[in-house]
Amino acid sequence: MIQVTRTDTDLDTDPGTNPGSGPGADAEAAPSDSCAECTNNASKKDINPFNRAVYAYLKTVPQGKVVTYGQVARAIGAPRASRQVGRALHVNPQPGIIPCHRVVFRDGSLAPAFAFGGMQIQAELLRSEGVEVKDCKVDLAKYGWKE
């Protein structure tokens, strides 16, 4: 498990500070990976210990598997921070390396505001890895990753 030290500050902090739970932290948010035309949406303030932990964890999720925002949050030691996970993915500094398209909502739904091209791009990326997507949903029982 990747551990993050948390404080009561928000994610919009300077690098090197620890983000906190923030407002609405327990809601499930959603996310890309190998999209060549993606741009780097991250600024220096977005690369903080929380975001780095999210990115490190996602690099361990195998192709053909998905995780939920809440699952990522729990795995990095911040169980009430699923919205912050979504925000971290939205500013993914390495869209071709950090596979944020493998993150879905807790019911298996894809992200309607997928940061790197929309729900259809997320579906295409998942299908290219062998994940079945039907009605913009993934079967978590079949494709959900259990460490």
Image: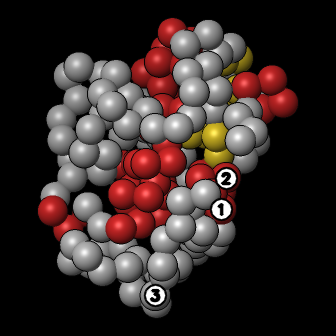
> Quadrant of the image for the N terminus?
bottom right
Specify whether 92 is left or right of 42: right
Q: Residue at x 48, y 81 (%)?
A: 6
Provide the residue designation for mark 3. Answer: 7
**Mark carried by residue 71:** 2
Q: Is residue 3 left or right of residue 10?
A: right
Q: Amino acid at mark 3?
A: Thr
Residue 74 shows which numbered tag?
1
Pointer 1 local density, CA inside 10 Å: few below 14, some 14–19, many at least 20? some
Q: Secondary structure at mark 2?
A: helix
Does 143 appear above or below 26?
A: above
- The residue located at (63%, 32%) in the rendering is 66
Percent x, y of residue 51: 38, 60
At label 1, the amino acid type is: Arg
Of residues 72 and 108, the one nearer the viewer is: 72
User: Given the current orientation, which residue lies at the most extreme right position?
Assistant: 141
Judge whether 20 appears above or below 44 on screen. below
Spatial CA distance of label 3 from label 1 is 16 Å
| Residue type at the position of mark 2 | Gln
